[in-house]
Image (cartoon, helix red, strand yellow):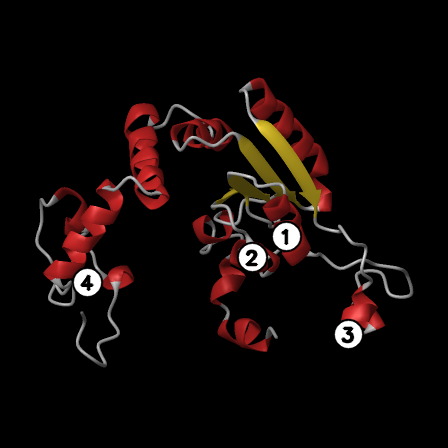
Amino acid sequence: MMSKGDDLSCSDCRQLNCYRHDKSYPKFCLTEALDPNLRAEMVEVYRGDELDGKMARAAAEIEGTYYGQLTRVEETLVFARRIGAKKIGIATCIGLIEESRTFAKFLNLGGMKTYVVLCKVGSIDKGDIGIPDELKVKPGNDESCCNPILQALLLNAEKTDLNVAVGLCVGHDSLFIRHSEAPVTVLVAKDRVLAHNPVAALYTSHSYCKRIFDADRINGLT
């Protein structure tokens, strides 16, 4: 692997030779430094008949077959079919329940069974987990916390074959993925400011969202 203390990584590379092999690798390249045995091990995993191999090949095949043709909604259905999934779990944010209903309707039309679990399931007040009232969105009111672990447990109990995260908050999505027994893919990444299109902050980092490079502002966020 990389030599100890060398913190250069793929973001520092301008060659990207690992994709087409039409350039040259930089001296710090992670691919060049890779143990050949580990590389061979990865090949065997992806060629294998276990779920990891099936998912790897399904994802690659979908990219090659439908590149630039299918929406992520459609790709999710095709991916589920190619890995043999029959029942899809949907872990949804309450703010995107209508979108999740539409998504479930689409999956049902495609022959999938679906099971949807809302983020507020269990109805546990934020105060009960130690959140001060002043840190609620609306202080002085009942306000249930998101419950991603319970979302995962309920979908585990349903024996879903694939789970889809729809608009779970940063951190809540991490907990859901951590506790889900079925593989997880993300349909919607929560971004309340940018209409759930978080990459827009990067696209406009030198114009509308140039604040992301304001060091004083960034260091003041806690």
Against 83, residue 167 (above or below) is: below
Confirm or deny contact between disc 1 and disc 2 (CB under 8 A): yes
Amino acid at pointer 2: His
Q: Residue at x 51, y 39 (%)?
A: 162
Q: Quadrant of the C terminus?
A: bottom right
Dot 3 crowding, Cα within 10 Å, few <14, some 14–19, many 20+: few
Amino acid at pointer 4: Leu
Q: Which residue is mark 1?
A: 153
Local secondary structure at mark 4: loop
Q: Which residue is mark 3?
A: 130
The numbered mark, 2 or 4, whose residue comes first in the sequence reads 4
Q: Which mark is residue 30?
A: 4
Local secondary structure at mark 3: loop
Q: Which mark is residue 188?
A: none
Question: In this rendering, does residue 167 appear at all?
Answer: no
The numbered mark, 4 or 1, whose residue comes first in the sequence reads 4
**Mark 4 and mark 3: span between their CA atoms?**
43 Å
The numbered mark, 4 or 3, whose residue comes first in the sequence reads 4
151 on left or right of 160: right
Against 48, residue 176 (above or below) is: below
Local secondary structure at mark 2: helix
Query: What percent of the width, then of the height, locates residue 109?
Result: 58, 18
Dot 4 crowding, Cα within 10 Å, few <14, some 14–19, many 20+: some
Q: Nearer the viewer, mark 4 or mark 3?
A: 3
Dot 2 crowding, Cα within 10 Å, few <14, some 14–19, many 20+: some
Confirm or deny contact between disc 3 and disc 2 (CB under 8 A): no
Query: What percent of the width, then of the height, locates residue 33?
Result: 13, 65
**Mark 1 and mark 3: span between their CA atoms?**
22 Å
Dot 1 crowding, Cα within 10 Å, few <14, some 14–19, many 20+: some
Q: As drawn, which residue projects farthest toward the right?
A: 140
Q: Which residue is mark 2?
A: 179
